[in-house]
Image (cartoon, coloured by chain):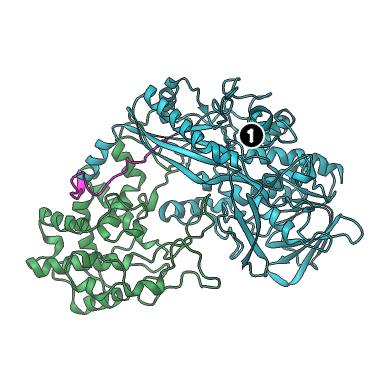
Chain colours: A green, B cyan
Amino acid sequence: MSEGRGGMNEGGGGLNEGGGGMTEGGGGMGDQSRRAFLKKAAGAVPGAAIAGSMGAGACTPDGTGRAAAERREGAERPDGAAPGAVEAGSAAAGQAVDLPEATLRAVADVALPTGALGPDGTETAIVGFVAWVDGFEPAAELDHPYLTGELRYGPPHPGPRWAAQLQAMDLESRRRSGAAFADRPAEERREIVAEAVGAGEAEGLPGSPARADHVVVGLLAWFYGTSEANDLCYRARVGRHVCRGTSSLPDEPEAL
Amino acid sequence: MTRPTAPQTIETDVCIIGAGITSAMVAERLAEDTDADIVVVEAGNEIFNLEERFDHRARYLAYGENPWPDDHIRGQTARDIQSRSMAVGGLALHWGGVTPRFTPEDFRLRSMYGVGTDWPIDYDVLEPFYQEAEERLGVAGEQGPEAYDERARPYPLPPMPLSYNLVRLKEWAERSGVPFWSNPVAKITAPYRDRSVCQRCDTCNICPTGAKYTPDLTFQKLLADGRVTLRSRTLVRRLELDETSDRIVEAVAVDRDRPDEPVRIRARTFVLAAGYAWSPHLLLLSRSERFPDGLANRTGNVGRWITGHRSVSAYAEVPFRLYPGMFNGHSLLSKRFQRPGSLDRYVRHDLRVWDSSARRGPRLRDDDGQPLLGDDLLDDWRARTETGVARMRAYYDVIPDRSSRIDLESGLENEWGDPMPRITFVDAPESRELRPHTEDSIRGVFQEMVSAGGGRVLSTGVGEAPDHPGGGCRMGEDPATSVVDSYGRTHDHENLFVVGAPTMVSGGCANGTLTFCALSLRSTEAIGRGV
């Protein structure tokens, strides 16, 4: 049975190809739809993070919208608290989040190892990431393994924040250069993305993509957590978390 | 039969309180050996969802979500409790399925080494029950060197194969002269009693195929055969004494779905199988005029001598490539240091080795702090994984003080007003005195392995919280220092038994679940004689 993390082996929806107030693309986005998007995202992120520069502001974790929606991590919910309650304006469980497609693809083009993946692998990764975002449930009860009696709950939905960051990258690109982010040369896009990554402190990738402050880090954390990425690293069919029987266990994994 | 709508009074021969792994062993054995009517009472839910486990596993892998939905009870907890799992299956729903035996020395610490307390039974008495437990769980194991791995009969199943990684690590580790072999596990490696064979999904905390033993498999079969009644979502709040004797006559419980109608279970024999925290807890809650400190507690030993073991671990770079992700959950085992022979100074521990991806993960920035993107990030990761990492860990038993205990916490109550357990681990003075020597010795073993095999130690650490806790109703021949006899029968109440982890005298140097199961099966012989 083929099994992969985060929908890497599945097709998925969620890339907004038009309509719904979140259209994206060179010169095609109407003001009305942009205002609708900003209104929708504003409930989850502080306004400054959208209007400000693509630096620390855009990477700032959720501000005012977070407190009401988020459950304290590492602590049990108060008795009687309704599970999954989220503030209006942020993504509720099961609600798809539209990530601006063109900008996301342009980010992925420089952030992911496209040389190793090739076009098909890159496309699969993008689709898988979007599916992962779509399937995210905010404040879900997390695994509570041995050696802890505490119940933990996940973070709020990262989708609106990430969507706003992608939108902000595009807006800033247009203001600075007159061109959409997706239309900039790869070197320039890489610089912008590196600047976003460089703003953080942690060296490693977060274990949970949802805890990534910035969509670029979220994308990388998700991708590099997949079985396919592990295989790419080791250039071998390790098949992490693929249910594949024990008969081949003693064998060195087959080279890719 | 589950979820009856009948009046809430139940009459039975044997009432087993708790539906974890030891309860499953007792229920199954009693059902085979006797015609007794058996009722199993569990506070938590039934999670009989094998057909959904692939889906839950997928959510766990993708999002870290709890793969066992509704496996706990809101407010029914304790500070520093080892796990919140409270459901049919208990902690053995998400256990790793690791099933080593204790060694003979674990039962004779005082006689052999002058530390701790001897058990009232020795390994030879328990040996046939270890075998039986292995057969019931479906344990796959490899016979280690006889000097270290004593057993009368073979494992019921062939060993879990070593991965390529563990084969390389075994070669590496054994250059130190320490023998290693495949760790025994309750996972099916060959066709066995209609169980599913392991598919190496490598999420043993949520086995989607049922190859790893979980107690729900036993309970579902017993229910299908009509041999037990399972009363889930029913929390036993106290046990009641007979008015004219010290026999237990009734368990009083709350049905969580019908809390205004108390459930009363009247039985000839009561078996507490609720684990190290909740079995002593129920006894302490069950106060009466004749037993003001709780049932089975005339001598004040209920809740005392809580045991466990600490761990010392290390990560070591090894000078060859490994492939993390092949089968992370399996390990090598050595019992060399559990069976040390004579000692100048007591130190015993197990020893396990895994392959690890620690310090070998992808990173966002290079050594100069510059962001890594695109193929550069992948190339950096590849370059850093030319050598592998071994994880080594040793459990050593912590000899408990009498004040290492479970009592009742004022100010922390469940929704029915019952005070919750308070768990306090306290090392015995001899344990505190031995601790630096023990931990230094273990780190020395790690260094010797690395020096002999090649590589370098990257880091070491100590797991402070005692793992695999037990005790609280420890067994012994003298009621002045114990709660139950070697069969788990309480000294104070002839028809009240405690089984499993609470009866342990010491935590041993290894995962204790197989030992809990063996003890429970032995207890069942005495329980069965009474019905």
x, y percent for residue B72: 59, 59
- Residue A31 vs residue B483, the one in the foreground: B483
Q: Which residues are magenta?
A: B354-375
| SS for callout 1 | loop
Q: Residue furthest right?
A: B244
Quadrant in the rendering for residue B432: top right
Q: Is residue A7 magenta?
A: no
Q: Is residue B164 above or below residue A31?
A: above
Q: Tell me, yes or no, if residue B170 can be seen here.
A: yes
- Secondary structure mostly taken by the magenta-highlighted segment of the chain: loop
Q: Is residue B311 left or right of residue B339?
A: left
Residue at the image position 29 percent from the left and 36 percent from the top? B385
The spot of residue B380 in percent (x, y) is 23, 41
Q: Looking at the figure, which quarter contains the N terminus of chain B? A: bottom right
Question: Is B358 within the magenta?
Answer: yes
* Left or right: residue B114 compared with residue A255: right
Say whether residue B158 is left or right of residue A153.
right
Tell me the kind of residue under disc 1: Val
**Residue A92: percent from left, percent from top:** 40, 70
Residue beneath disc 1: B115
Determine the chain carrying the residue at label 1.
Answer: B
